[in-house]
Image (tube, grey):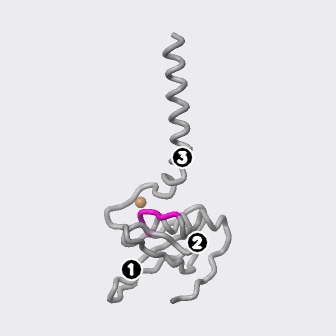
Amino acid sequence: MPELTRRTALTATAALAAGAVAAPRAAAEDHHHASPDSFDEVYRGRRIQGRSTGGHHGGYRVTVDGVELHVMRNADGTWISVVSHYDPVPTRRAAARAAVDELQGARLLPFPAN
Ligand SMILES: [Cu+2]
């Protein structure tokens, strides 16, 4: 069945190509929760935490190994952090994970508050 074999091979190739493109984003998103309000997990050996700090505008603090990571919300609801400015992700937890990916084991340095 040469035709079927060829078709199968082409399909497999296409799936591999799609997987290669989609993998980094899928890894960052992993899964998300209906309520992304707080998280506390070890991701790739780094402890990432996010929690509400109260405050009139719903203050929120994200940390990597206890050092604050500044995250910012885009107009479309996606998030970026100071260490991955050009790769918006759907949640603050995903932003923290992206930061860990970006840091590649480096320490996060405290960022001057503004
Ligand atoms: Cu989860």
Residue at 46% in and 63% down? 89
Cβ at disc 2 under 8 Å from ligand 1:
no
For marks 3 and 2 on the same chain, the one whose residue lies earlier in the sequence = 3
Q: Residues within 10 Å of mark 2 (few under 14, many from 20)?
A: some
For marks 3 and 1 on the same chain, the one whose residue lies earlier in the sequence = 3
Q: Amino acid at mark 3?
A: Val
Name above or below for residue 17 compared with residue 85: above
Q: Any mark on residue 83, and which?
A: 2
Tell me if I can see residue 10 in this picture: yes
Residue 74 picture quarter: bottom left
Secondary structure beneath dot 2 equals loop
For marks 1 and 2 on the same chain, the one whose residue lies earlier in the sequence = 1
Q: Position of residue 92 (x, y in %)?
A: 44, 69
Q: Which residues are magenta?
A: 87-92
Q: CA distance from mark 3 to mark 1?
A: 34 Å
Q: Any mark on residue 38, and which?
A: none
Name above or below for residue 10 compared with residue 113: above
In depth, the one of 42 and 36 nearer the eye is 36
Q: Any mark on residue 52, and which?
A: 1
Ligand 1 occupies quarter: bottom left
Q: Is residue 38 left or right of residue 114?
A: left
Q: Residues within 10 Å of mark 3 (few under 14, many from 20)?
A: few
